[in-house]
Every structure is written in structure tokens, then in C-alpha cells.
Image (spheres, grey):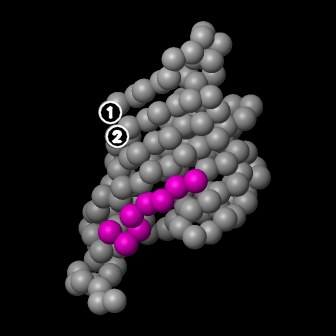
Amino acid sequence: MTDRNGAGGPAGESERERNVEVVRRYLRTFVTKDLAELAEVVAEDVQIYGSGAAVRGRHHVEGAISSPGLTVVDQEILELFAAEDRVVVSMAQTYRRDATGATAVQSACKMYRLAGGRIVQFWGEQDLYGLLRGLTMLPDESLAF
């Protein structure tokens, strides 16, 4: 894992450190499924952008964390970069399809904006197609365009 922080004074450094810890706590909730901790680190009206959609509300994240039949069994933060009120993370999460026991790794890149110690906006993309193929939920064949 690589953590990088830009140069700055002590006050800026402590804000970056706090923001990094908030994002780490948020990401951990996908493994722990701790919705109380999620509420501590994500604003109720969080703005979410990605996969061709824009939605608002922590309940969207709660649904993703609590989705039945799919469990995050491991999480690796590959790179993390913090600057001012932003934290950018590239990561890999290992999911298990509970019905079959199949596991697959999904890569993702996310950017978070924080205010007042909470995530208020985030953007990102993840390899959903690769995850579904790895969990044998889609046929393992090339797509024809």
C-alpha cells in the first residue's frame, strides 16, 4: 500500500490525516457492514457520481453495503492520495457470491470530497463487468460489437 500526501503546513497535514482516516473508516464498512460507523463518516445527503448516474443520499451506500448474497471478504488499498478536502483511492475488493462460494476481485478508483469530518461527495468507477464475470454471473465469452 502506498500513501502519499502533498507538502503543507501542520494544520493542512492534520486535516489531510483526518480525511484519510474518514475514508479508510468508510471503506472498512464494506467489510464490517457497520451501518452505525457509516453514518458517522458519510453525510446523510451525500452526492454520488459514477457508472453513468448521479444520486443523492447515504441510503444508496447503505444498500450497497447490505446487499444480500454478496460479501466483501477482503479489501486492499493500492494507492491513496490526499490533498486539501479530497482523497483519491485506487483499490481492489474481493467479493464472495454467497450462493456459490465463488470469489472475484473488483478494481475501483474513487475520489472523495470531505467537509466537517464527513464524506459529502464522491465519484468513481469500478469494474462491475469483470466482477460479474468472475462470479460466473455473466457468460465468460467475448462480447461482439
Q: Which residue is mark 1?
A: 1
Spatial CA span between label 2 and label 1: 5 Å
Q: Are marks 2 and 1 in contact (CB under 8 Å)?
A: yes
Q: Give the quadrant of the N terminus.
A: top left
Q: Give the quadrant of the C terminus.
A: bottom left
For this orientation, the residue located farthest to the top is 10
Query: Quick one: 132 or 125, which is closer to the camera?
Result: 125
Q: Is residue 21 above or below residue 62?
A: above
Mark 2 or mark 1, earlier in chain: 1
Where residue 35 appears, x then y in whole percent? 62, 48
Where residue 115 appears, x then y in whole percent? 72, 35
Classify 10 Å Cα crowding around label 1: few (below 14), some (14-19), many (20 and above): few
Q: Which residue is mark 2?
A: 78
Side (left or right) of 48 relative to 76: right
Where residue 140 appears, x then y in whole percent? 23, 81
Where residue 106 appears, x then y in whole percent? 35, 59
At x 67%, y 48%, the residue is 121
At x 75%, y 50%, the residue is 44
